[in-house]
């Protein structure tokens, strides 16, 4: 099969499109024919310590089941699924086929395109978990830092659906778009006065904040009221102050069920998935480099357009 692989251990820049053997599946795994791939900043880094090289990268995709292991009894060949498959010794999902544990699979509605489905497992999971941890109630005010990307665009809509009032930061070119998704207040993170602008909108500070992009945690603390809450997706390490409760997003077992519901909401048109660009598989390295700039609006994906042809 064709796969985009890191060729040597410790050489994260040694990515190349290669021909490698398709993975063999264990009894509790299925073999998925990959149809679309979500591109993430983590894709070049996430691999097991026991990886064998060349190693196919990537953790997020959607496709159809090609084959099932003896103990994988909940799915059949032809079923449409989305999934994350992280730190898999057999390789990641930037390939024509991927071996995936059955427990990682999520069914996708028949009327949801693979492109949209592949955009959901990582960003949708992080957005759902963030909203749960924030505990948004009607009229709560939330500031979201770096909200124009894949996670933020979903989080704005989910918070709005729960009755929250959202302020969000991003570059100015994305402000109209974030308002269209439900943000009530938008600020440009490059503007030195953005903190005061948020406080003009909500004197005393917002009830809670979501730090999505790295380096945004401190700014979130500045706009949250005393005794408020900050949830970080960014990984920023923050010291508590003014009674503010700080937590880091951790995906729970509940998220899988919620992702299935989110997929249904997207299929029904009630939640919008913003896709900046779909690259052909052969240009996957270019797509990854674009994503690593952290300036994408919404999600960047790879399609199986080239995969289908390359395997014939």
Image: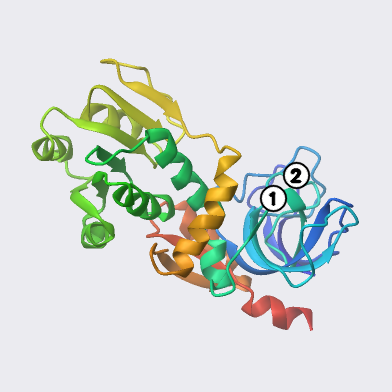
Residue at 31 percent across and 20 percent down: it is 244
SS assignment at label 2: loop
Q: Is residue 27 left or right of residue 176?
A: right
**Which circle marks residue 144 in the picture?**
none
- Does 2 appear above or below 252? below
Total residue callouts:
2
Q: Locate residue 204: give its quadrant.
A: top left
Residue occupied by mark 1:
104
Task: Classify 10 Å Cα crowding around label 2: few (below 14), some (14-19), many (20 and above).
Answer: few
The disc label shown at residue 9, or none = 2
Going from the N terminus, do you reach mark 2 or mark 1 first? 2
Does residue 41 show up?
no
- Judge left or right: residue 16 versus residue 252: right
Q: Which is nearer the eye, 291 or 226?
A: 226
Q: Which structural element holds mark 1? A: helix
Quick check: 30 left or right of 194? right
Q: Is residue 208 above or below residue 297?
A: above
Q: How is the image coloured?
A: rainbow
State which quadrant residue 39 falls in: bottom right
Q: Is residue 242 left or right of residue 53?
A: left
The location of residue 235, given as percent across then percent down, is 47, 33
Task: Say which of marks 2 and 1 sits in front.
Answer: 1
The answer to whether residue 52 is above or below residue 220 is below
Q: Nearer the viewer, residue 109 or 47?
A: 109
Q: Position of residue 97 (x, y in %)?
A: 76, 65
**Quadrant of image for the N terminus:** bottom right
């Amino acid at each position: 099969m064709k796969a985009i692989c890191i060729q040597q251990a410790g050489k994260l820049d040694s990515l190349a499109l290669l021909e490698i053997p398709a993975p063999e599946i264990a009894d509790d795994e299925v073999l998925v024919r990959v149809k679309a791939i979500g591109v993430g900043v983590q894709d070049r880094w996430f691999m097991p310590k026991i990886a064998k090289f060349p190693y196919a990268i990537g953790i997020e995709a959607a496709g159809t089941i090609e084959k099932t292991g003896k103990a994988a009894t909940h799915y059949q060949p032809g079923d449409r699924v989305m999934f994350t498959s992280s730190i898999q010794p057999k390789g990641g999902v930037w390939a024509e086929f991927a071996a995936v544990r059955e427990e990682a699979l999520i069914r996708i509605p028949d009327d949801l395109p693979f492109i949209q489905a592949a955009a959901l497992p990582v960003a949708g999971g992080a957005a759902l978990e963030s909203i749960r941890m924030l505990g948004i109630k009607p009229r709560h005010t939330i500031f979201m830092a770096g909200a124009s990307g894949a996670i933020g665009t979903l989080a704005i809509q989910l918070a709005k659906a729960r009755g929250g009032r959202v302020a969000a930061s991003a570059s100015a070119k994305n402000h109209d778009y974030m308002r269209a998704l439900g943000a009530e207040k938008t600020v440009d993170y490059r503007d030195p006065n953005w903190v005061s602008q948020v406080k003009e909108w909500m004197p005393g500070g917002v009830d809670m904040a979501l730090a999505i992009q790295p380096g945004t945690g401190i700014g979130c603390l500045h706009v949250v009221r005393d005794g408020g809450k900050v949830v970080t997706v960014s990984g920023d390490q923050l010291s508590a102050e003014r009674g503010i409760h700080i937590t880091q997003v951790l995906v729970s077992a509940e998220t899988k069920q919620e992702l299935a519901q989110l997929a249904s909401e997207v299929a029904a048109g009630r939640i919008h998935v913003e896709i900046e660009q779909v690259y052909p598989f052969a240009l996957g390295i270019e797509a990854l480099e674009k994503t690593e700039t952290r300036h994408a609006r919404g999600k960047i994906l790879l399609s199986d357009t080239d995969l289908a042809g390359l395997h014939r």
